[in-house]
């Protein structure tokens, strides 16, 4: 058992809710550890931006994620949970994901039950419970070090009804996962319902305001890890842009464009361009065309 995996296990088996640091490179991982964080996460969207400069639309390959994760996870003793997206394929691909990230030093892995790349159609956004459960079982059996944490991630916002959420949580718990990651959770009633159907710890990834209460209240409801967005990376990008802009202005009388913070990442990752491509090739129109062409 590695030190980082032992620490993550202690967090999940403890009685408090720990804030989760969003880390994106070796320095940010060391900073988070030095500050006192007990757990960090390397997001798939952040890795895509760091490695390719593109939005989170499943262009990042497994080998690129693993190389990035290895640099981040081995930089410190901070337990880092790596976002494994939907496993980069079927259950067999999930086994490869787990083996590679285990070697890279990940303390834990999240595996989600959504279709990636997104089909941009709500009725086709989730894989079946059976397929998702099969992937999680494959992930658990692929571990050589059983201390590495496998976390089942599922949307817990309005993208699926509560009955579907609870059915998925029950199935994933029965598969033997180490924790449930409730993505987008903002409603305390939903959290209470989830706690009724699972005995494993809960991790929450939530953006913006919610009614979940503070860390003590979350701890009392069985939440052990709470992650609230990727603000460190966003602020780092903004600071880089501002520094470059200031340097340019010192040596040039030419006007330079000035962007507000919330537009910087979307502008330089060419968000609009890739959104247009995604809608064209993976949206309902493209799906209908594919079906008609196979008749």
Image: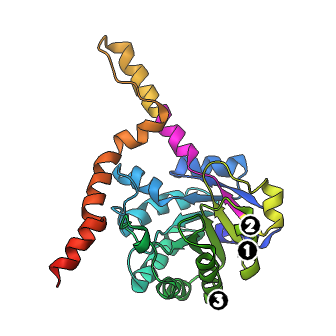
Query: Coloring scheme of the render?
Result: rainbow
Marks 3/1: CA distance?
A: 17 Å
- Tell me the SS state at disc 3: helix
Q: Which residue is mark 2?
A: 189
Q: Closer to the observer: label 2 or label 3?
A: 2
Is disc 2 surrounded by few (<14), some (14 to 19) or many (20+) residues within 10 Å? few
Residue 47's place in the image compared with 93, above or below, is: above
- Frontmost residue, 237 versus 215: 215
Residue stretch in magenta: 225-239
> Considering the image in quadrants, where does the C terminus appear?
bottom left
Could you tell which of marks 2 and 3 lies nearer the N-terminus? 3
- Tell whether label 1 touches label 2 (CB within 8 Å): yes
> Among all residues in the image, which is located at the extreme top?
253
Can residue 66 be seen at all in this image of the molecule? yes
Inter-mark Cα distance, 2 to 1: 6 Å
Quarter placement of the N terminus: bottom right
How packed mark 3 is, by other alpha carbons closer than 10 Å (few <14, some 14-19, many 20 or more), is: some
> In the rendered image, is residue 150 in sight?
no
Residue at (36% x, 62% y) in the render = 60
Label 1 crowding class (10 Å Cα cut-off): few <14, some 14-19, many 20+? some
Q: CA distance from mark 2 to mark 3?
A: 22 Å
Dominant secondary structure of the magenta stretch? helix
Q: Which mark is residue 193?
A: 1
x%, y% of residue 73? 55, 61
């Amino acid at each position: 058992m590695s030190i980082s995996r032992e620490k993550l296990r202690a967090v999940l088996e403890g009685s408090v809710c720990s804030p989760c640091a969003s880390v994106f490179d070796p320095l940010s991982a060391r900073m988070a550890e030095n500050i006192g964080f007990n757990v960090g996460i390397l997001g798939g969207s952040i890795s895509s931006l760091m490695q390719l400069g593109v939005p989170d639309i499943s262009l990042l390959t497994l080998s690129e994620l693993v190389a990035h994760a290895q640099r981040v996870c081995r930089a410190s003793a901070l337990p880092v949970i790596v976002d494994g997206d939907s496993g980069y394929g079927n259950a067999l691909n999930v086994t490869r994901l787990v083996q590679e990230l285990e070697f890279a030093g990940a303390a834990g892995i999240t595996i989600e039950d959504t279709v990636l790349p997104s089909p941009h159609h709500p009725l086709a956004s989730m894989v079946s419970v059976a397929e998702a459960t099969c992937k999680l079982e494959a992930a658990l059996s692929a571990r050589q070090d059983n201390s590495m944490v496998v976390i089942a991630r599922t949307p817990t916002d309005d993208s699926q009804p509560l009955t579907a959420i609870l059915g998925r949580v029950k199935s994933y718990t029965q598969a033997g996962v180490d924790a449930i990651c409730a993505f987008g959770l903002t409603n305390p009633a939903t959290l209470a319902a989830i706690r009724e159907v699972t005995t494993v710890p809960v991790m929450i990834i939530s953006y913006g305001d919610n009614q979940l209460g503070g860390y003590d209240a979350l701890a009392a409801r069985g939440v052990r890890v709470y992650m609230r967005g990727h603000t460190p990376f966003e602020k780092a990008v903004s600071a880089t842009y501002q520094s470059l802009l200031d340097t340019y202005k010192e040596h040039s009388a030419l006007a330079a464009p000035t962007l507000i913070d919330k537009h910087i990442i979307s502008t330089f990752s060419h968000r609009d361009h890739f959104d247009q491509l995604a809608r064209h090739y993976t949206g309902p129109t493209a799906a209908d065309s594919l079906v008609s062409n196979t008749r």
